Image (spheres, rainbow, N blue to C red):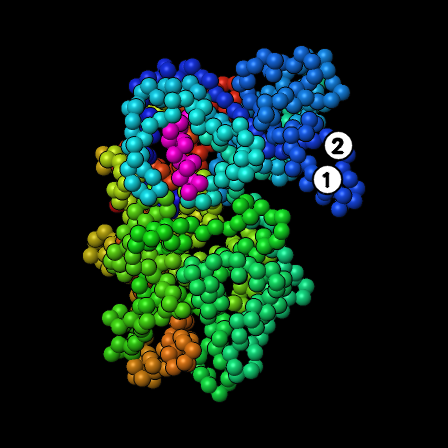
Amino acid sequence: MAFPYFSPLSPWIIDIMKGRENNPVLSSMKNPFIVMTSGALVVKGTAKDKLEDRKKELINIIKNEDVSSAYQGCIISNNINSLDLSYSKDKTCVGIDFTGKKIEVDGESGRNISTPIIESLDIDTDGANNTLKTARVTVRLFSLKQLEMFELFFMKPGMNVLVEFGDGSLFKIDKNIRLPKYDAYNKSGEKINFTPYSTVDQAFVPKNNYKEFCKNFSEYFRSSTDAFAKYVTNIQKSLGTYDLVAGKVIDFNFSIDTDGTYTATIEISQGNQVSLAIPIKAKKDNSKTQVQNSNPAPPTEEQIKEILAADLNIDLDRFKSLLDSTSHPDGSGGWLKKEFFNFFKINDTNKNTTASDKRYVSMRFILKILMNYSIETDGVDKDFFQFNIPVYKVGGKSTEIIPVTSNKNIISSTEQVIFPTNELPKFVSDKDGKIIIDTKNPIKGTINGYNFHISDKLEEAYNSILIENTNSNDVRVGNALNIFVNYEEVVNLWVKSYTRIQFLEKILELINKNGYGLIGLIFGLVEENAGPSIVDIKFKNTLKEGTTNDSKETYRFKPSTINSIVKEFNFNFEMSTLVAGRTIFNSGKFLAEAKDDSINKLNAAQAEDKLIELPETVIKSIDNSTFANADGYYSINRVELERVLQDVGKKAKKATVTAPENKDDDDEVTNPADDATKIIESKSIKYIMDTSGKNIEILVFKDRELVQNKIKQEQTNTKKPTLSPIDITLTIDGFSGFRCGQYFNIDGIPEIYNQIGIFQITNTKHNIDNNGWVTTLEASHNLTKN
C-alpha cells in the first residue's frame, strides 16, 4: 500500500548512503548491539491475601525501593564486556539492575553458566496499514531458575520493555565519511547546526536513574509531535546507527532444547493498533435509540448527555467526565453546541415540516470523545491507549486536522453523512429541462461555523511535506473532522461493535462509501514511528521544495554495481490470482463490448473495403503503450486484435442492419422543463441551519450519479494510478533513518520505471543476529509523471 505523503530521502541519509558506496569494505567490521531493559520492580516476599493489606504492602514497597531484596529493573545485552557478569562463577545471574547490582537467583549456585544471551532481534513496522511496530527478541537461557527470574522482568503480559539496537562499527564508519557538521531542522522548520554524537553510546536512553526511567518511559512511545521530533533528532545524531522500540509485552513463549537450555521469544508492541483492541463496553442487549423529545422546546445540553448515555448504553458520569476533561479545539468547551447538529431543532409538527429531523454528530466528536470513552477510568495507561489526531500547520498555526481530497461541488447524496461547505452546489435546470449544477452561485452551508473545505495553506505534520491548496480546477482540501455523521448510524455501529477498532473501521467505511471515490480513510500512520491515527490514502498532495525535505536529487540504489551497498534485491510484479482472473475476464468483456460497438462500423467498413475503426474497448484490450520501455518501444497484442476482428466479423455477417423504429410522439416528454423544479424538490433534503428556523438549506441531494459525474469532470489534477502492482524488497547494512513515505529510484532495472515514477517505502524491517545488522526496505512503485 502506498502512503499519502511523499518525501525524498533526507540529505544526511543520502550522504551516508553515498559514503558507504565509496567505502564498501569498511562494513566488514561488524559490532551489532542489542540492549533490552525492563522497568519492573522485583521484590521477594509473600503477597498478602486481603486486598486492603495488599494495597498497604505495595505502597510500602514502592516507597522503599532500596530494600535489600528488591531489584530495580533489569538490563541485559548481547555484548556485555564484564567477564564476571557474562559468565557466572557463583550464583546464577540474570542481568544487572539500575543500581548496578547483579540480579541473582536463589537456590542455584556453582553451575558456572552464562547470563541470558540475546541471540536475535527482528523489528517490523508493517502491521495493519503500517500501524504496528513490533520487536521480536529471541533469548537463550541456561537453567530453569534463570528462566523463572527472567520471566518476572520480561515475560509478563503488558510489561513495559525497552529494546535498543544498532551497530557501533557502522557509527564509526559513517562518522568518518561525512562532514563533521551538517544542517538539521527543529520541529518549527528552522535550520540548526547539526553535530553528530562523538560515540553511539550517547544515543542510549539513560539508565542511571530508575525513577526517571519509569517516569519518562511513555515518551518513548513517540505518540506526540515533540516526542517524535526528539526521536528523529536522536536518530540523526547517531547517523542512523541506533534505534529503539519501547512498548508492552503482548506475546511470549519458550521451548526446551535437547541440551537442556531454554529458548524464549518475546514480542514487544509499540503504541499501535493493539491499543484499539480494548472493548468499548457497550452492551448489545438493551440499547435502544432514543426518539426526539415530543416537547416543542428543544432539549437542554444535560438532556442531550442523558440521551447519548442511554442510546450508547454507557456510563453517564464517565461520559460527562470525559466531556469536561477534554478541551475543545476552539477553547470554548462547546462539545455539544459545536459538534452536534439538528439536536436542538424544535420538534413541532406544525413548523418546518419540510426540514429533516435527522440528527448528526461530527467526526471530531466521534474520534476525540467516543474513541476515548473506554479509557476514562482509573488505572488505565492513557499514554498508551489514548487515540490521537494528527497535528498539521494550517495557515502557520498547529491544528488538529485529517486532510482529505475533495471537490468544490461535493454534496452528500444520502442522509448518512453531511459535508458542510461555504460553496454548496446549487441545482437548477437548463433550457431543455436537464438538471445541472449552477457553479457561479454556490450556497453557504457551513454548520456551527465548520467548513469541510480549508482555504489556508496546509503543511504536513512534522514539516515533512508542504501542500499547496490553490483551489484550482475545483479541487479542494477537506478536513474529515468537519464531516457530520448521522447519529442513528453512529449508535447502530457502536452497539454492534465490541472493540474500538471495530467501531472505528465501520465509521471510516461509512465515510469512504459516501465520498464519491475521493476519500479513502484508514487507520494508519501520518509518519512512521509517530502515533497511529487516521490517514486518507487517496489524499493528493503537491510536493514542494521545503525546509526539511529540500533535496535536489532523487537518490538511486545501485544493486547491480560491484561496490553496491545493496545485499539483496527482489523485483516483484505482484499479480494476485484474483487480479489475474480479472485480467482474463476483462479481455472477454472488452471483446463482448467490442462486438456491440462495432457491428455497424464493420458493415460500413467492409462495404468500402476499409479497416474497421477500433472502439475504445478494443484499444484497451490490445494496447500496452503504458508499459513502454525507456527507448520508446511498446507492444500491441496482435493475437487479441485478430480474435476481436474475427469474432466481430462473424457476428456482422448474421446481423441485419435496420433503421431504428420511430417512437410515437405520445411517448416523448413534450415539456421536460416544466417538471425539473419538481424533480429537484423531490431529490432535495433540507435542514434548518440556525436556531431562528428561518435559514433552511439543501445539504443532501439524492442524485449520486449527477454529483459523481460533475466531480469526475472537475477533478482534473489527480495523479494517474500505479500502472501495475509492483513491489520491491531491498536489503542493506543496518540503518535506522528511513521512514515510510520516503522515496528513491533504483539502477539495474528497466529505466522506464525510474522515468515515470519512484519507489516509495511502505515498510522497514531490521534483523540482528550473529551475522550482523541488516535493514530491509519494502517499497511499491508509484507513478509521479504522466
Q: Position of residue 387 (x, y in %)?
A: 51, 51
**Mark toward the start of the polypeptide (2 vs 1):** 2
Residue 500 relative to residue 556: left or right: right
View extreme (bottom): residue: 350
Q: Quadrant of the N terminus?
A: top left
Q: Can residue 80 be seen in this view?
A: yes
Q: Is the magenta stretch mostly helix, strand or loop?
A: helix
Residue 303 falls in image quadrant: bottom right
Residue 469 relative to residue 251: left or right: left
Residue 365 relative to residue 636: left or right: right
Report the label total: 2
Amino acid marked by disc 1: Glu
Amino acid marked by disc 2: Gly
View extreme (right): residue: 49
Q: In the rendering, which numbered label is found on residue 57?
A: 1
What span is colored magenta in the figure?
226-241
Gap in Å between the C-alphas at discs 2 and 1? 10 Å
- Give SS at disc 1: helix
Q: Position of residue 76 (x, y in %)?
A: 58, 24
- Give SS at disc 2: loop
Q: Position of residue 138 (x, y in %)?
A: 59, 26
- Please give the residue where the numbered disc 2 appears in the rendered image: 45
Is the residue under label 1 in contact with that under label 2 (CB below 8 Å)?
A: yes
- As for residue 690 lying within the magenta part, the answer is no
Q: In the rendering, which numbered label is found on residue 117?
A: none
Label 1 neighbour load within 10 Å: few <14, some 14-19, many 20+: some
Q: Position of residue 393 (x, y in %)?
A: 34, 51
Label 2 neighbour load within 10 Å: few <14, some 14-19, many 20+: few
